[in-house]
Image: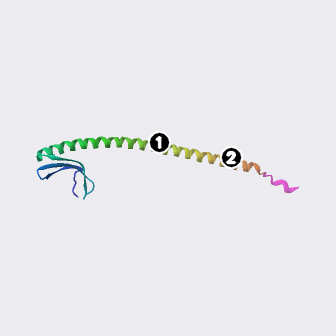
Amino acid sequence: MTQQKKFDYTIKQDANTWSAEITRRVSARRSSVSKRQDGFETEALAKEWAEAELLGFLEKQKQANARKSERRAERNAQAEKAAAAKEAANEKFLAKREEARAKALEADDEDYDYDYDEDED
């Protein structure tokens, strides 16, 4: 399996002018154009523009990825906090339910009179 760059540029000639495209690799078989500029007089000018734009494009992507990573970390921390709170509430509920059950059993035991000597008269 060959490794290809996620972002790259291509230079094409259209009659007397050159065009440059910033491409993004979508899958192994497909790529899409992220940015395009037409009308360059020489291939060197098109290549220069493409290289400069690709660097700026990659820097912009890096910043966006960092922002998304921060948001994801914040969301994960909030989700962990919510899960911990939910678990604590569940534990509290179960403990309270068990305590109520134990009290009910004690109350039930107190209602019965275990005096078995009544039949001996």
Label 2: few (<14), some (14–19) or many (≥20) C-alpha neighbours in 10 Å? few
Residue 45, numbered label:
none
The residue tagged 2 is 103
Q: In x, y percent, where is residue 120?
A: 86, 56
The residue tagged 1 is 81
Q: Residue at x 81, y 54 (%)?
A: 116
N-terminal label among 2 and 1 = 1
Q: In x, y percent, where is residue 8?
A: 21, 49
Q: Nearer the viewer, mark 2 or mark 1?
A: 1
Q: In x, y percent, where is residue 50?
A: 18, 45
The picture quadrant where one finds residue 69 is top left
Asked whether 29 or 92 is in front, the reply is: 29
Region rendered in magenta? 113-121
- Secondary structure, mark 2, is helix
Mark 1 belongs to which amino acid? Lys
Q: Would residue 48 be found to the left or right of residue 110 on screen?
A: left
Label 1: few (<14), some (14–19) or many (≥20) C-alpha neighbours in 10 Å? few
Q: Residue at x 16, y 47 (%)?
A: 39
